Every structure is written in structure tokens, then in C-alpha cells.
Image: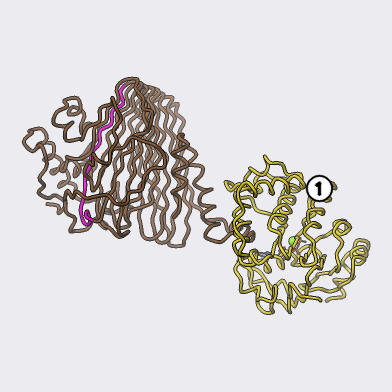
């Protein structure tokens, strides 16, 4: 049976008084992986931020349902606790807040929402180290402040680690591959793939087809001028790689 | 005559110098009155707006039902409603600790020092404190002695002291090479709206190479007024290091005046304050380098929400002969709401050459990007804010050397 997980209907939204998303429609069903590709400044990160409830973004019309519920009515943390996760394009540094207690709070907040008991500290640390090891983030790094002094690639691996720990049902990866060397890309892709399941879905925002060789999407969408202008399968990404956006962007105007 | 000057039955009125000492306090307070916006040193804090008309000097003995205790072992000197409570105290062996009035009446060494560091013509509340000179304690460590545990001065106020005022005067002397840790806690029990006025003077003398770590936690009731003056004299090679966390009271000032009077004398005066509501919390410092090769540093950080107001007045004075001196000062504040306010007045008076001196002040807000990031991981807004506030204050709490004390302070940071 096909169950929709995230349904975006005729969404219009913007930031700082500027309309960026203009009539966006997309339904992601349970277990599906969708990729969105689009030119710089098209509004891909804006869409991610709107979906996660970031302040400063205005939704002018349209609807978004997540697990059948009105997503736009939920607070930022509620969305996360319901299982929405965003791997950010540009994660922020938080000096003085170390990764380990930060993630412990996050994991336990999500667990509490799901009616699960708090994780015991030792158990949590064991899991965190284990997942960290898979992403080549050692115990010393996990003692550091969140993202402080992290290289671009390290930040992306830390985003992936958080995704592994939080086990979201719907993960949005906003350029999870930017700044990654080839080995790191493989680690991140492995991390992401291990979150895939029949129930869990993903929205992968990327500029490069390479990531999609590792995380094979069910659908590829081209996003331009505030909405999806073309949808296809993974071959569309390859076509785009060869031809660029020009043809699609012009078509949509 | 000010309404705060009342008839009081105080011990030792038959001792001539004491009577005179109190009389001088009355006169000097009467001459200055309760400071207001017109008084330069108090212009941001305006005590006249907070001190109620009907405060009464009273000595109410009461039982303690619910006093927060320290999570580590200390010696204890307890005051309940401003009165020494021997049954709640645990005095260290072998060192001189006496109720102030006893020291004043029977200990010529103490007598000779009482009030000598404080200029009561410039400190109206210290003058008022003298007028009621009675309570407090005298602590003296002999040369080269050290204690195995900190001494905690536990001030606790109960419901019975509602509408009252208390004036305490402590004299702390560390002879050459002596070392001690002093902890002050100001707490209350009963309704949070309990109103009272606590007025405290600490005179601290550090002789050659003596070292004092002075930690203070001010958590008075929300309608209380707390005025504290720490006057410190540091001799050659001595170190005075303080950390004060202020959280309570309607109006509170913690003022620290240090004179670095001999070479290599050092002072580190650090503080944190955090409040919501309508409180005014004031940190005032005055570090006087009167001698060459002296060192001072200050770091004060505040977190202000609601319609509360933080005040920082920090003065560094370097006298003409005080060459090769270093004096540093930093104040930073985090404003959590639009109506929160911080008033900052740094004053550097440098009359010597060849000195290193700096000061800085900055005000900021919680970072919206950081908050979004944390919440997007499922952490609730309030918890995320609390984590960011902890992270903000971490820098100043890191100045606390005693790990048990810093852990304790970290546990107190709930707003
Ligand atoms: N806070 C803001 N104020 C003004 N304009 C903004 C703001 N945030 C985004 N924009 C603008 O909105 C547009 C869409 O930006 P967005 O970051 O969503 O693009 P993107 O598709 O993610 O691009 P990229 O591929 O470069 O990451 C851009 O023109 C950008 O400058
Ligand atoms: Mg982007």
C-alpha cells in the first residue's frame, strides 16, 4: 500500500518579503527517495527551511502535511520530534555546547515524544561512538563544541551522524555532499543508506549526480523558478549533468 | 532624619568607642541619605526606588525549615535573619572565629581594624551598616595556615523577617602566607515575594603572600534588597580571587573595592548575573593599583531577560607610582528580551607610564541560527536557550579554581 508521508500542495513562500517558492507541489510516499536538483538561488534551501519551520520565512499559501498532520502548524522541535530531519547546507557553530550532551538532549527529547524512556548515558555514549566510528569521527571529536572549527567535510559527516542517532522518518539532505572528498562521500552515503527503509523517506538536494550513484533515488525533480519543472527517474540527473539547466529553466518560464 | 535610622537595642552601647563608632555611622548616613539617580555612583541602580518606607530594624530569631545546603563539605558560619546561628554552624578548629560584637568588645587586634578599610563618607550603606554595628563575624588565619575545607558564610532569611532590615559586618584577616576559601550563600525560605533589606560589609585584609578565594551566590527573595560592599586590601604577593553569581533580589549590588598596596599584589574579580522579571542587579568594582607591579583582571558576564536591568560599573585606577602594572576588564551581557537593559560604566584612570591596561564591553542576543539548529534536532526552545546560556557563562565560571565550587555554580544556572 502506498502511504503518503510528506505532501506539499501548491506552496507559496518566501523570505524577507521576497517570494521564492511559487506553486510547489510534491508528494513523498513512505520508503521513497526523491532528489531535487536546481540552479543556485532557485530556492532549494528556502524550501528545506520552510519545511523545518525556520523563523523569518513566510508561507503565503498552500499546505504541507506530514504523516497526515498539518506540518506548518508545528513548532520547529515538534517537527523534529515527529521525525523530520534536515542535514543543513551550512551548519552553524555553537561554541561551548559539546556534541555529546547536545545530541543526548536531542535524542532523549525525540524519545520522550515517542513515549520511549530516556537512554542511559553509558548506552548512549556507546551508540554514539559506534556510529561516529563508521563516519570516521573519533571520540575526541565528539567531545568538541558543535561544529566549532570543523572542516566542511567534517560538518557534513557530523550532520549524517546526527541523522543516524535521531533516526528520522523523513530526512532532507541539503547538499550533504558539498565539500566531501571521495572517501567521505562514500561514508556519508553509507550512513544515509542505512537510514533507508520501507517506512523512511528522503529528499536529497544536490548539484551533482555523483551522490545519486551512491544513494539511488526513485525520482529526480528539477526545481526552477520556485517550482518543480520536470520529474523523471535517476537518468534525469545524468541528462542534467550533460546538458545543464538552461533548457529546463527556459521551458518553465 | 532618614527613616532607616531607628532606635535599636544593640549590645556594647556602654563601650565608649563602639557608641561613638555607631554614632559616626548614623551621622554619615544621615548626611548622605539613600542614594538616588542624582548620586553618580548609584545613578543606574537608584536604591531610593526600591527601599520601602516601612523597613524595620529587628532581630527575629526563627527556626530554619528549608535552607539550601552546599553539595560539598565546608565549615559553616550561619546567620538566620541576620543573626548568628551557632546551632547551624560548624567552626573550624584552631582558627580565630568570633561573633563580630565579641571581637569588637574583647579583641583589641580586631578593634584596631574594624572599619579601617572603608570610607563611610563615600559609602552611605556602609555608614548605615556602622550605625547598626552588631552582627557578623571576625575570622583570622594565622601566618602560613591553611584550611582543609572552605568556610561557608550561610545567610538565610525566613518569613519572620518580612519587612525587616539586617546589617552585617565581617572582618577577615589572613596573615602572611595564610590561605583560605570563603563561600557566601544568601538564601531565603517561604514566599518568593518576601521583602527585606540585607546590608553587608566585608573587610578583607590579605597580608604578604596570603591568598583568598572568595565565592558568593546571591539568591535573595524577589522583593529583597541586597547591598554588599567588599573592601579588600592586598599586600605584597597576596592574591584575592573572587567570583560572584547574582540571581535573586529586587535590587542587588555587589561592590568590590580592592587596593593593591604592595608589589606583586593581585586581584581577580569575576562575576556572573542572570535574571528575569523586574530585578536590577548591579556589579560594581573599583580596583586601585597604588603600587608598582600589581595585577588585576575582571570578567563579568550577565544574562538579562524580562524587564530586568543589569548594571556594571568597573573602575581601574592606576596611581602615578604604579609602573609595570596590569589591569584588565571585560563586561559582556546577553539580552533575552527587548525590554531587558544593561547599563555599563567603565572607568579607567591611569596616571602611571609603562602599564598594560584594557577594557571592553559588549551586549548581544541569543543567536537565532544556533537556536534553530538546536530546535531542529528536537531540543525544546527553553532547553535550547538554557544550553546556550550555560555555554555563554561557561567562560566566566571556568575562572573558578575549585572544581566542586564550579560544578555547584553550574547547577545553579536555571533562570
Ligand atoms: N534571508 C534572506 N534575505 C533575502 N534573500 C534571501 C534570504 N535567504 C535567501 N534569500 C534569497 O532567496 C533565494 C533562494 O535562496 P536559496 O538559498 O533557497 O537557494 P538554493 O536553491 O538553495 O541555492 P544554492 O544551490 O546556491 O544552495 C536566493 O536568491 C537568496 O539570495
Ligand atoms: Mg541551498
Q: Is residue B336 left or right of residue A171?
A: left
- Please tell me whether residue B64 is drawn above or below residue A242 in the rendered image: above
Q: Position of residue B67 (x, y in %)?
A: 32, 49
Q: Is residue B246 left or right of residue B16?
A: right
Q: Is residue B400 something one can see in this rendering?
A: yes
Mark 1: C-beta under 8 Å from nearest atom of ligand 1: no
Q: Which residue is mark 1?
A: A184
User: What letter labels the chain drawn in brown?
Assistant: B
| Colour representing chain A | yellow
Of helix, strand and loop, which mostly describes the magenta segment?
Answer: strand
Seen at 79% across and 61% down, the residue is: A196
Give yes or no for residue B195 being in the magenta stretch.
Answer: no
Give the residue furthest to the left. B14
Q: Is residue B332 left or right of residue B173?
A: right
- Please tell me whether residue A125 is drawn above or below residue B354 in the rendered image: below
Q: Is residue B313 left or right of residue B14?
A: right
Give yes or no for residue B163 being in the magenta stretch.
Answer: yes
Seen at 81% across and 73% down, the residue is: A228
Q: Nearer the viewer, residue A160 or B35?
A: A160
Quadrant in the picture for residue B117: top left
Q: Quadrant of the N terminus of chain A?
A: bottom right
Amino acid at each position: 500500500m502506498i502511504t503518503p508521508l510528506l505532501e506539499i500542495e501548491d506552496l507559496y513562500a518566501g523570505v524577507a518579503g521576497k517570494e521564492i517558492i511559487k506553486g510547489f507541489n510534491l508528494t513523498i510516499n513512505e520508503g521513497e527517495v526523491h532528489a531535487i536538483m536546481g540552479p543556485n538561488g532557485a530556492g532549494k534551501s528556502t524550501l528545506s527551511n520552510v519545511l523545518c519551520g525556520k523563523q523569518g520565512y513566510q508561507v503565503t499559501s498552500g499546505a504541507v502535511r506530514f504523516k497526515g498532520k498539518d506540518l506548518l502548524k508545528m513548532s520547529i522541535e515538534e517537527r523534529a520530534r515527529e521525525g523530520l530531519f534536515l542535514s543543513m547546507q551550512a551548519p552553524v557553530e555553537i561554541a561551548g555546547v559539546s556534541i555529546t550532551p547536545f545530541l543526548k538532549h536531542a535524542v532523549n527529547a525525540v524519545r520522550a515524544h515517542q513515549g520511549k524512556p530516556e537512554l542511559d548515558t553509558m548506552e548512549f555514549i556507546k551508540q554514539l561512538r559506534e556510529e561516529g566510528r563508521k563516519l570516521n569521527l573519533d571520540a575526541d571529536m565528539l567531545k568538541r563544541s558543535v561544529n566549532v572549527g570543523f572542516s566542511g567535510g567534517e560538518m557534513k559527516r557530523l550532520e549524517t551522524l546526527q541523522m543516524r542517532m535521531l533516526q528520522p522518518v523523513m530526512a532532507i539532505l541539503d547538499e550533504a555532499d558539498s565539500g566531501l572528498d571521495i572517501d567521505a562521500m562514500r561514508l556519508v552515503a553509507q550512513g544515509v543508506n542505512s537510514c533507508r527503509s520501507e517506512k523512511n523517506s528522503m529528499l536529497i538536494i544536490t548539484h551533482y549526480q555523483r551522490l545519486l550513484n551512491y544513494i539511488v533515488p526513485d525520482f529526480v525533480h528539477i526545481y526552477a523558478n520556485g517550482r518543480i519543472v520536470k520529474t523523471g527517474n535517476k537518468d534525469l540527473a545524468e541528462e542534467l549533468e550533460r546538458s545543464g539547466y538552461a533548457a529546463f529553466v527556459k521551458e518553465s518560464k | 532624619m532618614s527613616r532607616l535610622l531607628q532606635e535599636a537595642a544593640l549590645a556594647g552601647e556602654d563601650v565608649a568607642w563602639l557608641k561613638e563608632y555607631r554614632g559616626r555611622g548614623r551621622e554619615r548616613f544621615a548626611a548622605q541619605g539613600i542614594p538616588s539617580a542624582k548620586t553618580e555612583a548609584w545613578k543606574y541602580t537608584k536604591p531610593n526606588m526600591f527601599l520601602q518606607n516601612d523597613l524595620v530594624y529587628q532581630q527575629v530569631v526563627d527556626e530554619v525549615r528549608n535552607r539550601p545546603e552546599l553539595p560539598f563539605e565546608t565549615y559553616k558560619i550561619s546567620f538566620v535573619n541576620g543573626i548568628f546561628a551557632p546551632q547551624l554552624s560548624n567552626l573550624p578548629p584552631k582558627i580565630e572565629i568570633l561573633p563580630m560584637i565579641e571581637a569588637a568588645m574583647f579583641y583589641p587586634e580586631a578593634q584596631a581594624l574594624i572599619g579601617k578599610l572603608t570610607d563611610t563618607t563615600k559609602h552611605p550603606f556602609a555608614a548605615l551598616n556602622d550605625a547598626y554595628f552588631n552582627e557578623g563575624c571576625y575570622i583570622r588565619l594565622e601566618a602560613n595556615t591553611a584550611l582543609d575545607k572552605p568556610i561557608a558564610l550561610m545567610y538565610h532569611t525566613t518569613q519572620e523577617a518580612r519587612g525587616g532590615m539586617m546589617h552585617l559586618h565581617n572582618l577577615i584577616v589572613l596573615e602572611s602566607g595564610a590561605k583560605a576559601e570563603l563561600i557566601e550563600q544568601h538564601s531565603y525560605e517561604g514566599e518568593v515575594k518576601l521583602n527585606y533589606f540585607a546590608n553587608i560589609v566585608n573587610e578583607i585584609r590579605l597580608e604578604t603572600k596570603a591568598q583568598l578565594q572568595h565565592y558568593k551566590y546571591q539568591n535573595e527573595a524577589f522583593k529583597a534588597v541586597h547591598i554588599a560592599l567588599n573592601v579588600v586590601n592586598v599586600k605584597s604577593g597576596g592574591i584575592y580571587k573572587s567570583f560572584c553569581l547574582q540571581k535573586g533580589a529586587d535590587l542587588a549590588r555587589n561592590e568590590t573595592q580592592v587596593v593593591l598596596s604592595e608589589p606583586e599584589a593581585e586581584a581577580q574579580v569575576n562575576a556572573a548575573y542572570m535574571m528575569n522579571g523586574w530585578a536590577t542587579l548591579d556589579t560594581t568594582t573599583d580596583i586601585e593599583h597604588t603600587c608598582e607591579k600589581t595585577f588585576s583582571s575582571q570578567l563579568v558576564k550577565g544574562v538579562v531577560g524580562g524587564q530586568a536591568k543589569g548594571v556594571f560599573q568597573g573602575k581601574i585606577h592606576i596611581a602615578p607610582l604604579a609602573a609595570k602594572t596590569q589591569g584588565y576588564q571585560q563586561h559582556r551581557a546577553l539580552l533575552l528580551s527587548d525590554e531587558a537593559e544593561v547599563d555599563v560604566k567603565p572607568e579607567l584612570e591611569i596616571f602611571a607610564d609603562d602599564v598594560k591596561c584594557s577594557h571592553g564591553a559588549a551586549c548581544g542576543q541569543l543567536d537565532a541560527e544556533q537556536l534553530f539548529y538546536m530546535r531542529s534536532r528536537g531540543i525544546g526552545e527553553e532547553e535550547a536557550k538554557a544550553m546556550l546560556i550555560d555555554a555563554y557563562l561557561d567562560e566566566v565560571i571556568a575562572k573558578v579554581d575549585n572544581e566542586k565550587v564550579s560544578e555547584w555554580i553550574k547547577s545553579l544556572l536555571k533562570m
